[in-house]
Image: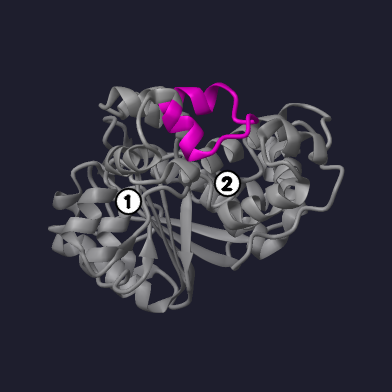
Amino acid sequence: MGGVGAATPGAGGRVVVIVAFDQVQLLDVSGPLEVFTTANRYGACYDVRVVSPTGTDVLTSCGLRIGASARPERLPRGVDTLLVPGRRDWRCATADDALMSLVSGLAERARRVTSVCAGAFVLAQAGILDGRRATTHWELAPQLATAFPQVRVEPDPVFVRDGHVVTSAGVTAGIDLALALVEEDHGADLAREVARQLVVFMARPGGQSQFSVRMSAQHSQHPLVRRAMDEITADPSLPRGIDALAAGLGISGRHLARLFRQETGMTPGQYIDAVRVEAAQALLSSGTTSVEEVAQQAGFGSSETMRRAFQHVFGVSPTVYRARFRTTAGPATSPVASLPA
Protein backbone atom coordinates (compact mmCIF):
# COMPACT_ATOMS: atom_id res chain seq x y z
CA MET A 1 0.00 0.00 0.00
CA GLY A 2 1.03 3.64 -0.26
CA GLY A 3 1.29 5.61 2.98
CA VAL A 4 3.34 4.44 5.92
CA GLY A 5 5.38 1.98 3.91
CA ALA A 6 5.75 4.22 0.87
CA ALA A 7 9.12 5.41 -0.40
CA THR A 8 10.22 8.72 1.08
CA PRO A 9 12.33 11.61 -0.21
CA GLY A 10 16.00 11.82 0.52
CA ALA A 11 17.48 8.87 -1.40
CA GLY A 12 21.24 9.02 -1.16
CA GLY A 13 21.17 10.78 2.22
CA ARG A 14 21.40 9.46 5.76
CA VAL A 15 19.85 5.99 5.72
CA VAL A 16 17.31 5.57 8.53
CA VAL A 17 16.00 2.03 8.91
CA ILE A 18 12.75 1.58 10.85
CA VAL A 19 12.02 -2.05 11.61
CA ALA A 20 8.38 -3.17 11.31
CA PHE A 21 6.95 -6.51 12.39
CA ASP A 22 3.58 -8.06 13.19
CA GLN A 23 1.70 -6.38 16.07
CA VAL A 24 4.12 -3.45 16.16
CA GLN A 25 2.59 -0.31 17.64
CA LEU A 26 1.69 1.90 14.70
CA LEU A 27 2.68 5.22 16.28
CA ASP A 28 6.09 3.80 17.19
CA VAL A 29 6.64 3.57 13.43
CA SER A 30 4.63 6.45 12.00
CA GLY A 31 5.65 9.10 14.57
CA PRO A 32 9.41 9.02 13.89
CA LEU A 33 8.74 8.42 10.19
CA GLU A 34 6.78 11.68 9.97
CA VAL A 35 9.54 13.57 11.77
CA PHE A 36 12.31 12.36 9.46
CA THR A 37 10.34 12.81 6.23
CA THR A 38 9.05 16.23 7.28
CA ALA A 39 12.66 17.21 8.01
CA ASN A 40 13.44 16.52 4.35
CA ARG A 41 11.05 19.33 3.39
CA TYR A 42 13.25 21.78 5.30
CA GLY A 43 16.63 20.76 3.95
CA ALA A 44 17.49 17.47 5.65
CA CYS A 45 18.33 14.45 3.53
CA TYR A 46 17.06 11.31 5.23
CA ASP A 47 16.64 8.15 3.19
CA VAL A 48 14.03 6.40 5.31
CA ARG A 49 13.41 2.69 4.84
CA VAL A 50 10.67 0.72 6.61
CA VAL A 51 11.87 -2.87 6.67
CA SER A 52 10.22 -6.07 7.88
CA PRO A 53 12.09 -9.34 8.55
CA THR A 54 10.48 -11.00 5.52
CA GLY A 55 10.20 -7.90 3.36
CA THR A 56 6.40 -8.22 3.31
CA ASP A 57 3.54 -6.24 4.84
CA VAL A 58 2.91 -6.44 8.60
CA LEU A 59 -0.24 -6.15 10.68
CA THR A 60 0.08 -3.48 13.38
CA SER A 61 -1.38 -3.64 16.89
CA CYS A 62 -4.34 -1.47 15.87
CA GLY A 63 -5.23 -3.71 12.96
CA LEU A 64 -3.86 -1.51 10.17
CA ARG A 65 -1.64 -3.27 7.67
CA ILE A 66 1.45 -1.35 6.57
CA GLY A 67 3.89 -2.05 3.81
CA ALA A 68 7.65 -2.43 3.87
CA SER A 69 9.52 -0.08 1.56
CA ALA A 70 12.61 -2.29 1.22
CA ARG A 71 13.69 -5.88 1.68
CA PRO A 72 16.47 -6.49 4.23
CA GLU A 73 18.90 -7.82 1.63
CA ARG A 74 18.50 -4.67 -0.47
CA LEU A 75 19.52 -2.24 2.24
CA PRO A 76 22.78 -0.34 1.73
CA ARG A 77 25.73 -1.47 3.77
CA GLY A 78 26.02 1.85 5.57
CA VAL A 79 23.14 2.57 7.97
CA ASP A 80 23.08 5.88 9.78
CA THR A 81 20.24 5.22 12.22
CA LEU A 82 18.46 2.03 13.22
CA LEU A 83 15.11 2.52 14.95
CA VAL A 84 13.39 -0.44 16.61
CA PRO A 85 9.74 0.09 17.65
CA GLY A 86 7.91 -2.21 20.03
CA ARG A 87 4.85 -4.31 20.64
CA ARG A 88 3.06 -4.69 23.95
CA ASP A 89 3.68 -8.45 24.06
CA TRP A 90 7.43 -8.01 23.99
CA ARG A 91 8.07 -11.71 24.64
CA CYS A 92 6.69 -12.55 21.19
CA ALA A 93 9.04 -9.98 19.66
CA THR A 94 12.15 -11.25 21.47
CA ALA A 95 11.22 -14.85 20.56
CA ASP A 96 11.01 -14.00 16.84
CA ASP A 97 14.27 -15.37 15.44
CA ALA A 98 13.90 -13.57 12.10
CA LEU A 99 13.33 -10.24 13.82
CA MET A 100 16.22 -10.72 16.23
CA SER A 101 18.56 -11.71 13.41
CA LEU A 102 17.56 -8.62 11.40
CA VAL A 103 18.02 -6.23 14.32
CA SER A 104 21.34 -7.74 15.41
CA GLY A 105 22.75 -7.54 11.89
CA LEU A 106 21.60 -3.97 11.32
CA ALA A 107 22.84 -2.83 14.73
CA GLU A 108 26.37 -3.97 13.90
CA ARG A 109 26.54 -1.62 10.92
CA ALA A 110 24.51 1.35 12.24
CA ARG A 111 26.12 4.58 13.41
CA ARG A 112 23.47 4.87 16.12
CA VAL A 113 20.85 2.46 17.41
CA THR A 114 17.54 3.62 18.86
CA SER A 115 14.32 2.15 20.18
CA VAL A 116 10.81 3.31 20.99
CA CYS A 117 8.79 1.96 23.91
CA ALA A 118 8.98 -1.87 24.09
CA GLY A 119 11.58 -1.88 21.32
CA ALA A 120 14.08 -1.71 24.19
CA PHE A 121 13.34 -5.38 24.91
CA VAL A 122 14.47 -6.32 21.41
CA LEU A 123 17.70 -4.38 21.85
CA ALA A 124 18.21 -5.99 25.25
CA GLN A 125 17.62 -9.47 23.86
CA ALA A 126 20.22 -8.76 21.19
CA GLY A 127 22.74 -7.82 23.90
CA ILE A 128 22.94 -4.22 22.68
CA LEU A 129 21.90 -2.80 26.05
CA ASP A 130 24.26 -4.90 28.19
CA GLY A 131 25.87 -2.60 30.75
CA ARG A 132 24.05 0.43 29.35
CA ARG A 133 21.49 2.83 30.77
CA ALA A 134 18.12 2.48 29.07
CA THR A 135 14.45 3.34 29.39
CA THR A 136 11.11 2.12 28.09
CA HIS A 137 7.44 2.78 28.83
CA TRP A 138 7.16 3.34 32.58
CA GLU A 139 4.72 0.44 32.94
CA LEU A 140 7.17 -1.96 31.28
CA ALA A 141 10.30 -0.74 33.05
CA PRO A 142 10.10 -3.25 35.95
CA GLN A 143 9.74 -6.09 33.42
CA LEU A 144 12.79 -4.88 31.49
CA ALA A 145 14.83 -4.71 34.69
CA THR A 146 13.74 -8.21 35.75
CA ALA A 147 14.14 -9.89 32.36
CA PHE A 148 17.49 -8.23 31.63
CA PRO A 149 19.32 -7.50 34.89
CA GLN A 150 22.45 -6.53 32.95
CA VAL A 151 20.61 -3.42 31.72
CA ARG A 152 20.59 -0.31 33.96
CA VAL A 153 16.92 0.59 33.60
CA GLU A 154 15.82 4.18 34.25
CA PRO A 155 12.00 4.15 34.32
CA ASP A 156 11.36 7.88 34.41
CA PRO A 157 13.05 9.75 31.50
CA VAL A 158 11.46 10.36 28.11
CA PHE A 159 14.62 9.03 26.50
CA VAL A 160 18.07 7.94 27.59
CA ARG A 161 21.30 8.19 25.60
CA ASP A 162 24.22 5.90 26.40
CA GLY A 163 26.96 6.16 23.80
CA HIS A 164 25.55 5.51 20.34
CA VAL A 165 22.43 3.83 21.74
CA VAL A 166 19.28 5.84 22.55
CA THR A 167 16.15 4.29 24.05
CA SER A 168 12.86 6.11 24.53
CA ALA A 169 9.68 5.77 26.52
CA GLY A 170 6.06 5.24 25.46
CA VAL A 171 4.77 5.72 21.92
CA THR A 172 4.73 9.53 21.59
CA ALA A 173 8.25 9.66 23.05
CA GLY A 174 9.38 8.33 19.68
CA ILE A 175 8.51 11.74 18.24
CA ASP A 176 10.62 13.47 20.91
CA LEU A 177 13.47 11.09 20.16
CA ALA A 178 13.30 11.65 16.40
CA LEU A 179 13.22 15.43 16.84
CA ALA A 180 16.28 15.25 19.07
CA LEU A 181 18.10 13.21 16.41
CA VAL A 182 17.14 15.71 13.71
CA GLU A 183 18.44 18.53 15.89
CA GLU A 184 21.66 16.60 16.48
CA ASP A 185 22.11 16.12 12.72
CA HIS A 186 20.91 19.46 11.36
CA GLY A 187 20.67 21.93 14.21
CA ALA A 188 17.93 23.48 16.30
CA ASP A 189 16.52 25.77 13.61
CA LEU A 190 15.61 22.95 11.24
CA ALA A 191 14.26 20.79 14.06
CA ARG A 192 12.17 23.75 15.22
CA GLU A 193 10.59 24.03 11.78
CA VAL A 194 9.71 20.34 11.84
CA ALA A 195 8.14 20.66 15.30
CA ARG A 196 6.09 23.68 14.24
CA GLN A 197 4.89 21.88 11.12
CA LEU A 198 3.82 18.84 13.14
CA VAL A 199 2.36 21.06 15.91
CA VAL A 200 4.36 19.40 18.67
CA PHE A 201 6.91 20.56 21.22
CA MET A 202 10.38 21.19 19.83
CA ALA A 203 11.50 18.24 21.92
CA ARG A 204 10.90 17.38 25.51
CA PRO A 205 14.35 17.11 27.06
CA GLY A 206 15.33 13.48 27.47
CA GLY A 207 15.44 13.77 31.26
CA GLN A 208 11.86 14.98 31.53
CA SER A 209 9.58 12.63 33.46
CA GLN A 210 7.20 10.39 31.51
CA PHE A 211 4.31 11.47 33.72
CA SER A 212 3.39 14.09 36.27
CA VAL A 213 5.04 13.69 39.65
CA ARG A 214 1.81 14.95 41.20
CA MET A 215 0.00 11.87 39.94
CA SER A 216 2.15 9.71 42.20
CA ALA A 217 0.11 10.85 45.20
CA GLN A 218 -2.86 8.98 43.74
CA HIS A 219 -0.90 5.72 43.88
CA SER A 220 0.20 6.00 47.49
CA GLN A 221 -1.76 3.69 49.77
CA HIS A 222 -0.76 5.28 53.08
CA PRO A 223 -3.10 8.12 54.16
CA LEU A 224 -0.36 10.11 55.92
CA VAL A 225 1.90 10.04 52.88
CA ARG A 226 -0.97 11.07 50.65
CA ARG A 227 -1.76 13.99 52.98
CA ALA A 228 1.87 15.10 52.96
CA MET A 229 2.04 14.87 49.16
CA ASP A 230 -1.20 16.79 48.76
CA GLU A 231 0.07 19.54 51.07
CA ILE A 232 3.32 19.84 49.09
CA THR A 233 1.62 19.97 45.70
CA ALA A 234 -1.00 22.48 46.90
CA ASP A 235 1.69 25.17 47.14
CA PRO A 236 5.27 24.14 46.35
CA SER A 237 6.50 27.68 47.08
CA LEU A 238 5.96 27.35 50.82
CA PRO A 239 9.16 26.72 52.78
CA ARG A 240 8.95 23.23 54.25
CA GLY A 241 11.26 21.14 56.37
CA ILE A 242 10.56 17.47 56.96
CA ASP A 243 10.10 18.00 60.71
CA ALA A 244 7.51 20.74 60.23
CA LEU A 245 5.71 18.63 57.62
CA ALA A 246 5.72 15.61 59.94
CA ALA A 247 4.57 17.66 62.94
CA GLY A 248 1.47 18.71 61.01
CA LEU A 249 0.69 15.01 60.56
CA GLY A 250 1.35 14.15 64.20
CA ILE A 251 4.37 11.94 63.52
CA SER A 252 8.16 12.27 63.69
CA GLY A 253 10.29 13.36 60.78
CA ARG A 254 12.10 10.01 60.82
CA HIS A 255 8.82 8.11 60.61
CA LEU A 256 7.59 10.27 57.73
CA ALA A 257 10.85 9.78 55.84
CA ARG A 258 10.56 6.01 56.28
CA LEU A 259 6.93 5.96 55.11
CA PHE A 260 7.77 8.18 52.15
CA ARG A 261 10.55 5.89 50.98
CA GLN A 262 8.34 2.82 51.35
CA GLU A 263 5.49 4.38 49.38
CA THR A 264 7.28 6.45 46.73
CA GLY A 265 10.91 5.33 46.58
CA MET A 266 12.06 8.89 47.34
CA THR A 267 12.56 11.13 50.34
CA PRO A 268 10.16 13.98 51.16
CA GLY A 269 12.89 16.41 50.08
CA GLN A 270 13.25 14.72 46.70
CA TYR A 271 9.51 14.84 46.19
CA ILE A 272 9.40 18.54 47.07
CA ASP A 273 12.18 19.22 44.55
CA ALA A 274 10.35 17.23 41.85
CA VAL A 275 7.09 19.11 42.45
CA ARG A 276 8.91 22.45 42.32
CA VAL A 277 10.56 21.51 39.01
CA GLU A 278 7.18 20.55 37.59
CA ALA A 279 5.63 23.80 38.83
CA ALA A 280 8.48 25.75 37.23
CA GLN A 281 7.94 23.90 33.94
CA ALA A 282 4.31 25.05 33.86
CA LEU A 283 5.20 28.64 34.76
CA LEU A 284 7.97 28.86 32.18
CA SER A 285 5.66 27.71 29.42
CA SER A 286 2.59 29.72 30.37
CA GLY A 287 3.64 33.33 29.80
CA THR A 288 6.18 36.08 30.08
CA THR A 289 7.01 35.68 33.77
CA SER A 290 10.73 36.22 34.28
CA VAL A 291 12.97 33.33 35.25
CA GLU A 292 13.63 34.96 38.63
CA GLU A 293 9.88 35.28 39.30
CA VAL A 294 9.33 31.67 38.26
CA ALA A 295 12.01 30.56 40.70
CA GLN A 296 10.28 32.43 43.54
CA GLN A 297 6.78 31.19 42.69
CA ALA A 298 7.93 27.59 42.31
CA GLY A 299 9.68 27.65 45.67
CA PHE A 300 13.33 27.57 44.58
CA GLY A 301 14.15 30.89 46.17
CA SER A 302 16.61 31.93 43.47
CA SER A 303 17.08 31.48 39.75
CA GLU A 304 20.49 29.92 40.34
CA THR A 305 19.00 27.17 42.50
CA MET A 306 16.37 26.53 39.83
CA ARG A 307 19.03 26.51 37.10
CA ARG A 308 20.99 23.81 38.93
CA ALA A 309 17.82 21.74 39.33
CA PHE A 310 16.96 22.03 35.62
CA GLN A 311 20.50 21.17 34.58
CA HIS A 312 20.40 18.08 36.79
CA VAL A 313 16.98 16.85 35.61
CA PHE A 314 16.87 17.97 31.97
CA GLY A 315 20.42 18.82 31.01
CA VAL A 316 19.30 22.30 29.91
CA SER A 317 18.76 25.64 31.64
CA PRO A 318 15.28 27.08 32.41
CA THR A 319 15.79 29.63 29.62
CA VAL A 320 16.51 26.91 27.06
CA TYR A 321 13.61 24.84 28.37
CA ARG A 322 11.25 27.80 27.88
CA ALA A 323 12.55 28.37 24.36
CA ARG A 324 11.99 24.72 23.48
CA PHE A 325 8.47 24.70 24.82
CA ARG A 326 7.50 27.76 22.83
CA THR A 327 8.79 26.52 19.49
CA THR A 328 5.34 25.29 18.35
CA ALA A 329 3.84 28.77 18.81
CA GLY A 330 6.44 30.69 16.84
CA PRO A 331 10.14 31.37 16.49
CA ALA A 332 12.09 31.23 19.71
CA THR A 333 13.28 34.56 21.02
CA SER A 334 16.53 33.11 22.31
CA PRO A 335 19.02 30.58 20.97
CA VAL A 336 18.24 26.91 21.58
CA ALA A 337 21.28 24.77 22.27
CA SER A 338 21.49 21.22 21.00
CA LEU A 339 20.67 18.42 23.40
CA PRO A 340 23.79 17.25 25.19
CA ALA A 341 25.30 14.05 23.87
Q: Amino acid at mark 2?
A: Val
Residue farthest along the right direction in this orientation: 333
Q: Visible in this render: residue 9?
A: no
Where residue 64 sits: x, y (%)?
A: 31, 32
In screen coordinates, is 222 left or right of 254? left
Q: Counting other residues with Cα less than 10 Å from the Cα at mark 2, is it few (<14), some (14-19), or many (20 or more)?
A: many
Q: Which residues are magenta?
A: 228-247
Q: Mark 1: which secondary structure? A: loop
Q: Amino acid at mark 1?
A: Ala
What quarter of the picture does the C terminus occupy? bottom right
Q: Main secondary structure of the magenta part?
A: helix
The answer to whether 41 is drawn above or below residue 220 in the figure is: below
Q: Is residue 130 a member of the stretch shown in magenta?
A: no
The mark that comes first in sequence, 2 or 1, is 1
Q: Which residue is mark 1?
A: 20
Q: Mark 2: which secondary structure? A: helix
Residue at coordinates 45% horizontally, 57% vertically from top-left? 49
In screen coordinates, is 92 left or right of 31? left
Disc number for residue 35: 2
Res. 122 image quadrant: bottom left
Q: Is residue 236 a member of the stretch shown in magenta?
A: yes
The answer to whether 99 is drawn above or below residue 277 in the figure is: below
Disc number for residue 144: none
Q: 280 or 163: nearer the eye?
A: 280
Residue at coordinates 48% horizontally, 73% vertically from top-left? 163
Where residue 91 sits: x, y (%)?
A: 15, 51
Where residue 131 sits: x, y (%)?
A: 32, 74
